[in-house]
Image (spheres, helix red, strand yellow):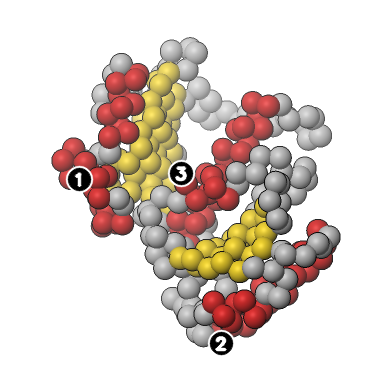
Amino acid sequence: MPYREKRIYSGAMLEIERVHCTSCGRIIGRRPRGLPTGKAQARINLRNAQLKLARLMCENFCRGDYHITLTFSQTMTREQQAEALAKLLRWLRRACRKAGGGRYADGDLRYICVREDRGVRPHYHLVCQAFGLMVDELAEAWPWGRVEMGTLDGCPDYGWLARYLTKQEDQDKGRKRWSQSKNLRPPYMPEPKILKRKALSYRPKVPKDYYALTHYRNATAGGYEWEYIICIRKDRKQELPLDIQEQLDQAGCWSAYTEDMEQTGL
């Protein structure tokens, strides 16, 4: 039976998924809406949301862009907090256009915003492009509490940041896990390829301009192999920790790859 290979390009990150093609040409329907979500499905939904968020950040943001935390120091309703955020976003859009939009010629603000309130003071995490914003200007535009402003480190894979931003497990039902501007670029996903082979290769195959950063390989209950690889472009290697860079130079892959090979007995 053939295998299906799906690739997702998000900035400097490339995801490659190869699975046994049990449904080539068939359309599998979805469950009816309104049914309760089981625990296993809830974990899958969270994982998919984290992957989608990581892809958006890898595609649209880079080293030096802003990671802003906006905390409320006073008691406010959920609606009042949303109004405060909307007011700040309008101010940021004006400031971004006035500054020329940073690296974007159209001058429009690109952002992702996540709310958190479980066990901590309600606050927003805001990721947006850099455009010469000063901390004192931002603090003056946010009179509702404390402001913290940092920058992204340029890591080619923002999966860790996506997991951190969505760590609040008990999300309100019916609400999105994050909000975003409409002008974000989506990742590029070409049509999946059908691989006419009966088994996967011993070592994962990646494009020549990429390193294999993370590799997962296992088999289904029916005995069919699958693999999932996260790759990064070679020109972004210098933005990784030094110990990972050394291992990439020596073996062309990170140690997580060899550990997975040992655990699966491959």
The x and y percentages for residue 240 are 31, 52
1 vs 2, front mark: 1
Tell me if mark 3 has few (under 14), some (14-19) or many (20+) residues whose alpha carbon lies within 10 angstroms of its own.
Answer: few
Closest to the observer, 98 or 125: 125
Q: Is residue 217 above or below residue 181?
A: above
Q: Secondary structure at mark 2?
A: helix
Residue assigned mark 2: 98
The x and y percentages for residue 168 are 65, 44
Amino acid type, mark 2: Lys
Q: Is residue 255 above or below residue 219?
A: below
Whether residues under marks 3 and 2 lie with C-beta atoms below 8 angstroms apart, the answer is: no
Tell me if mark 1 has few (under 14), some (14-19) or many (20+) residues whose alpha carbon lies within 10 angstroms of its own.
Answer: some
Amino acid type, mark 1: Glu
Q: Which mark is residue 191?
A: 3
Work out whether mark 1 precedes mark 2 in sequence or the reverse, and give the earlier one: 2
Q: Quadrant of residue 215?
A: top left
Residue 229 in sight in this render = yes
Residue furthest to the bottom: 98
Work out whether mark 3 precedes mark 1 in sequence or the reverse, and give the earlier one: 3
Q: Is residue 72 above or below residue 191?
A: below
Write the residue at 43% across / 18% down: 219
Write the residue at 44% across / 76% down: 103
Write the residue at 30% across / 32% down: 257
3 vs 1, front mark: 1
The x and y percentages for residue 127 are 55, 63
Residue 196 in sight in this render = no
Residue assigned mark 1: 246
Number of numbered markers = 3
